[in-house]
Image (cartoon, helix red, strand yellow):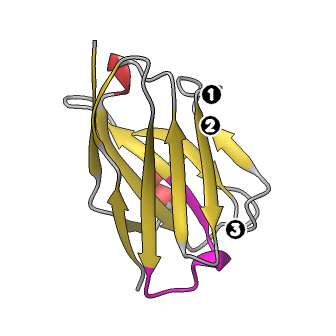
């Protein structure tokens, strides 16, 4: 059983930056691909970014490519999402997730993830 706890969300002005963290416990974090997803009010969950277990392969959703950076520190069992040039449309609850089944890359489909955090709210004001 893996527990995930996100932090770092908050209110930021458009053009600003935030760094989200996701602390993992209860499992061998370094063995899993992990990802960030987000869900805005009234919208479907969206893949934001993913990273493989070794951290050398990343993937980004089209809407965040070039602005967000995903990284992980396996020694600290922590996943990060550095967000810059934030836009009001980035406003959402952000979730981290772990996939038991994938290691060499992080899938984009949320149904392929097995554990989820409780989410952290990011609000970008215009």
For the residues bearing labels 2 and 1, Cβ distance under 8 angstroms: yes
Question: Quadrant where the N terminus lies?
Answer: bottom left
What residue is pinned by disc 1?
Answer: 65
Which is more N-terminal, label 3 or label 1? 3
- Along the viewing direction, whichever of 92 and 14 lies nearer the viewer: 14
Q: Give the total number of marks visible in the rendering.
A: 3
Q: How far apart are marks 2 and 1 (CA)?
A: 6 Å
Report the residue that reaches farthest toward the top. 126
Instruction: Specify start and end residues of the magenta stretch as a single range.
Output: 25-35
Coordinates of residue 113 in the picture (x, y in percent): 48, 62
* Residue 60 marker: 2
Q: Residues within 10 Å of mark 1 (few under 14, many from 20)?
A: few
The residue that appears at 51% across and 29% down in the rendered structure is 84
Q: Could you say whether the residue bearing mark 3 is in a helix, strand or loop?
A: loop
Q: Quadrant of the C terminus?
A: top left
Q: Is residue 107 visible?
A: no
To which quarter of the image does residue 51 belong? Answer: bottom right
Q: In this view, does 34 lie to the left or right of 123?
A: right
Measured as percent of width and height from the top left, residue 85 is found at 50, 21
Few, some or many residues within 10 Å of mark 2 (<14, 14–19, 20+) = many
Q: Callout 1: helix, strand or loop?
A: loop
Nearest the viewer among 48 and 120 is: 120
| Residue under the point 29% across and 35% down | 92
Inter-mark Cα distance, 1 to 3? 20 Å
Residue for badge 3: 53
């Amino acid at each position: 059983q893996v527990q995930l706890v996100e932090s770092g969300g908050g209110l930021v002005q458009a053009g600003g930056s935030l760094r989200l963290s996701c602390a993992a416990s209860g499992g061998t974090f370094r063995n899993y691909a992990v990802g960030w997803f987000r869900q805005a009010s009234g919208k479907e969950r969206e893949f934001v970014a993913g990273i493989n277990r070794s951290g050398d392969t990343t993937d980004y959703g089209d809407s965040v490519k070039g602005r967000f950076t995903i990284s992980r520190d396996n020694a600290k069992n922590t996943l990060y999402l550095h967000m810059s040039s934030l836009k009001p449309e980035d406003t959402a609850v952000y979730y981290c997730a772990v996939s038991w089944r994938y290691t060499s890359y992080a899938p984009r489909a949320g149904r392929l993830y097995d554990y989820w955090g409780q989410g952290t709210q990011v609000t970008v004001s215009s």
